[in-house]
Image (spheres, rainbow, N blue to C red):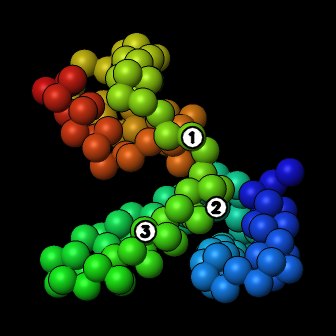
Amino acid sequence: MTIRDKLQAALKDAMRAKEAERLSTLRLINAAIKDRDIAARAEGEDAVSDSDILAVLGRMVKQRQESARVYEEGERPELAARERAEIKVIEEFLPRQLSSAEITAAIEDAVAETGATSLRDMGRIMAILKAKYTGQMDFGAVGAQIKARLG
């Protein structure tokens, strides 16, 4: 079952159960995916793959985490709570996040696979990690770990 199929099933279930907030978040997810589909068609590609959808979902989670932080700083806890509720719904469709030990092992494997010795090889390492672990790790934090490892 693809991510799109899971989303459609969840959307129908939320409609039947009259879960308004969950339904709203699922509709936001579908809209973001459709936007990505339209952009892909403009570039001459077919419908986006599951890995592209995972990337969209990952961006949505990051956006909501940042929004929740800003709302908390602005003393708007009710809005921060809503953002966190949306994060929980979005994360249902993301694969399990890797632990720090698993991330370190994945970095070591990618370094060994590429034979990387300097920061100039960072792009190749990130390409391998993104191909294998899209949606399972925060690549911003991983970039810092790779720099520390190769630096």
Q: Nearer the viewer, mark 3 or mark 2?
A: 3
- Neighbor class of circle 1 (other Cα within 10 Å; few <14, some 14-19, many 20+) is few
> For the residues marked 1 and 2, what is the alpha-carbon distance in whole angstroms?
15 Å
The Cα atoms of the two marked residues, 3 and 1, are separated by 18 Å
The percent position of residue 123, horizontal first and vertical second, equals: 35, 39
Secondary structure beneath dot 3 equals helix
Residue pointed to by mark 2: 53
Looking at the picture, which amino acid does disc 3 mark? Arg
Q: Earlier in the sequence, mark 3 or mark 1?
A: 3
Q: Residue 12's x, y, as percent?
A: 85, 76
Q: Residues within 10 Å of mark 3 (few under 14, many from 20)?
A: some
Q: Residue at x 64, y 61 (%)?
A: 53
Q: Is residue 131 left or right of residue 126?
A: right
In the rendered view, tell whether residue 70 sits above or below residue 129.
Answer: below
Q: Which mark is residue 96?
A: 1
Quarter of the view holding residue 23: bottom right
Front label number (1 vs 2) = 1
Question: What number of labels is visible?
Answer: 3
**Left or right of 40, for residue 79:** left
The crowding category of the residue bearing disc 2, from other C-alpha atoms within 10 Å (few below 14, some 14 to 19, many at least 20), is many
* Residue bearing mark 3: 84
Q: Secondary structure at mark 2?
A: helix
